[in-house]
Image (spheres, rainbow, N blue to C red):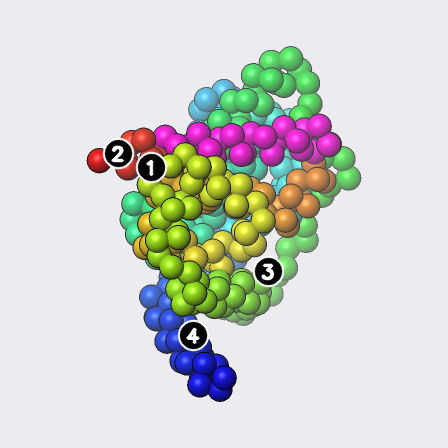
Amino acid sequence: MWEAIHRELVYLWYYTDVQLRQIFWYWVLGIVVGSVISVFGKSRLHAFCERIGARLSGVAGWVLGSLLVIASPLCMYGTIPICASFSQKGIKEDFLASFMMSSMLLNPQLIMYSMALGWKVLVLRIASCFLCGVAAGGLIYAAYCKRNCKYFNFNSLYEPCNRDTDPRWWLRLLKNIGRNLKATGPWFLLGILLSALFQIHVPPEAVGRLFGRHEGFGVLLAATGGVPLYVCGGGTIPLLRQWLAEGMSLGSATAFMLTGPATKITNLGALQLALGAKHFGLYLAFVLLFSLLTGLLVNLMLCPQT
């Protein structure tokens, strides 16, 4: 028995060490980039988004709203109060939908983390998140704005207080980095551990069967699996990296990367503040359908059957 435990620990240490060597610096880079943007550029970025939202409408607003907010390091609990402020200043709801959707799916930290997955997956992640934001803006415009109806309810929501207030810029930066490390570190290490256990105990062919290249079921499983499995962006990178290495299709990975952050428990809790039960249900249906169709399209275009 002790020999079996010792062997398990040796394997666990080996695979954990391999994963850390391959991914650790992407995680560090993401934290540093996100903190730099948060401390030195967040207010300017959001002021620029406000000016864009006030001047542009329609497709141009959805496109720029989706593009600009990807550079925002705020979590959903920080984004929603800012959107409430935008709404009070007359910014249209279709722009806010694009802004919120893209903000939920992607940020500078997650872009840095995703570099560990390779350039192709990184491009797919950025493109699919951007298009999801544009699609959200278009749907809100068609279903609500054209009929002068309200989709969001921002009553009693205010901008969060800024914690980056120390007069010394270097101390503001260090404190922000510390908060990011505290928030993402445990989930990142858990993802490394789960990935190592996955490598030890799950046969590679099982991943190929579940998330295989040519099976629509794999995309559906990845889209729905993102709902309970996704907790933190950094924590899922090791798992995605291993799944892709063992046969997960690009379409399944794309579906997972869309539904995961869009249905993360903390994000859903924040959205409950701005959506009623009916609108919340419509949001979930949109996310799952968009993720499934995007994953199938990616497989069709990039993973042709042989």
Number of the label disc, if any, that sits on residue 304: 2
- Which element carries disc 4, helix, strand or loop? helix
Q: Quick one: label 4, few (<14), some, or many (20+) residues within 10 Å? A: many
| First in sequence: mark 3 vs mark 2 | 3
Inspect this view and state whether residue 79 appears: yes
Q: Whole-percent x and y of residue 137?
A: 53, 26
- Residue highlighted by disc 3: 164
Task: Indicate yes or no whether the magenta region holds residue 106.
Answer: no
> Which amino acid, by three-letter code, is at mark 4?
Leu
**Residue with the most extreme top position:** 147
**Image: 12 above or below 165:** below
> Which amino acid, by three-letter code, is at mark 3?
Asp
- Residue highlighted by disc 4: 12
- Which element carries disc 2, helix, strand or loop? loop
Inter-mark Cα distance, 3 to 2: 49 Å
- Residue highlighted by disc 1: 214
> Which amino acid, by three-letter code, is at mark 1?
His
* Stretch in magenta: 275-297
**Residue with the most extreme bottom position:** 2
Inter-mark Cα distance, 2 to 1: 8 Å
